[in-house]
Image: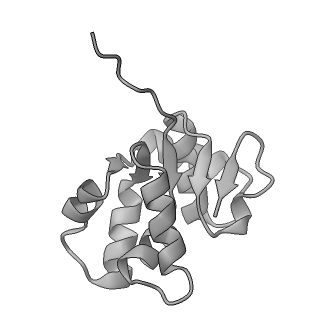
């Protein structure tokens, strides 16, 4: 019987996906390498899809994220309540991302946002 390889899920922040989708001059290649290195096992919030739409105008983001192996996690009232109670990061949007990670047992975030540094139990990779 073939055993399925287990992997730890990693959360992908908006900035990494934005750099990748826009082929950002400074960080585009780095974002691409991170996405390739940590696939399978990537996940992000439904909030990310909306933010990327606002930033890029792309409407087929669900298909794009599926193609590159990023699971879209739901944004629930429970996550919003948890985000409201978190002291860090400073921005509410980032607290929603952190709350999504906590609710889904994810401890690693691919992000260029240093606001995730120093949060107990969270490792930022960029």
Residue 109's place in the image compared with 111, above or below, is above
Q: Nearer the viewer, residue 76 or 9?
A: 9
Q: Quadrant of the C terminus?
A: bottom right
The percent position of residue 1, horizontal first and vertical second, equals: 27, 9
Along the line of sight, the residue nearer the viewer: 11 or 80: 11
Residue closest to the far bottom:
25
Residue projecting furthest to the right: 118
Residue at the image position 76 percent from the left and 49 percent from the top? 119
Which image quadrant for residue 110?
A: bottom right
Q: Is residue 87 left or right of residue 69?
A: right
Residue 13: percent from left, percent from top = 51, 62
Q: Residue at x 43, y 69 (%)?
A: 17
Q: Residue furthest top?
A: 1
Q: Position of residue 60 (x, y in %)?
A: 18, 69
- Looking at the image, can residue 7 be seen? yes
In this rendered view, identify the residue nearer to me: 17 or 118: 17
Picture coordinates of residue 74 (x, y %)?
Answer: 35, 46
Looking at the image, which residue is at 39% across and 44% down? 40
Tell me the residue at 40%/63% (across/down). 48
Q: How many marks?
A: 0
Place residue 47 in its image quadrant.
Answer: bottom left
């Amino acid at each position: 019987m073939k055993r399925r390889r287990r992997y730890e899920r990693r959360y992908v922040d908006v900035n990494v996906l934005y750099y990748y989708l826009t082929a950002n001059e400074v960080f585009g290649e780095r974002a691409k390498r991170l996405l390739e290195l940590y696939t399978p096992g990537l996940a992000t919030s439904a909030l990310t899809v909306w933010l990327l739409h606002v930033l890029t105008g792309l409407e087929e983001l669900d298909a794009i994220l599926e193609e590159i192996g990023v699971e879209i996690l739901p944004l629930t009232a429970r996550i919003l309540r948890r985000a409201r109670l978190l002291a860090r990061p400073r921005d509410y949007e980032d607290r929603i991302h952190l709350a999504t990670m906590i609710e889904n047992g994810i401890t690693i975030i691919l992000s260029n946002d240093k606001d995730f540094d120093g949060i107990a139990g969270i490792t930022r990779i960029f």
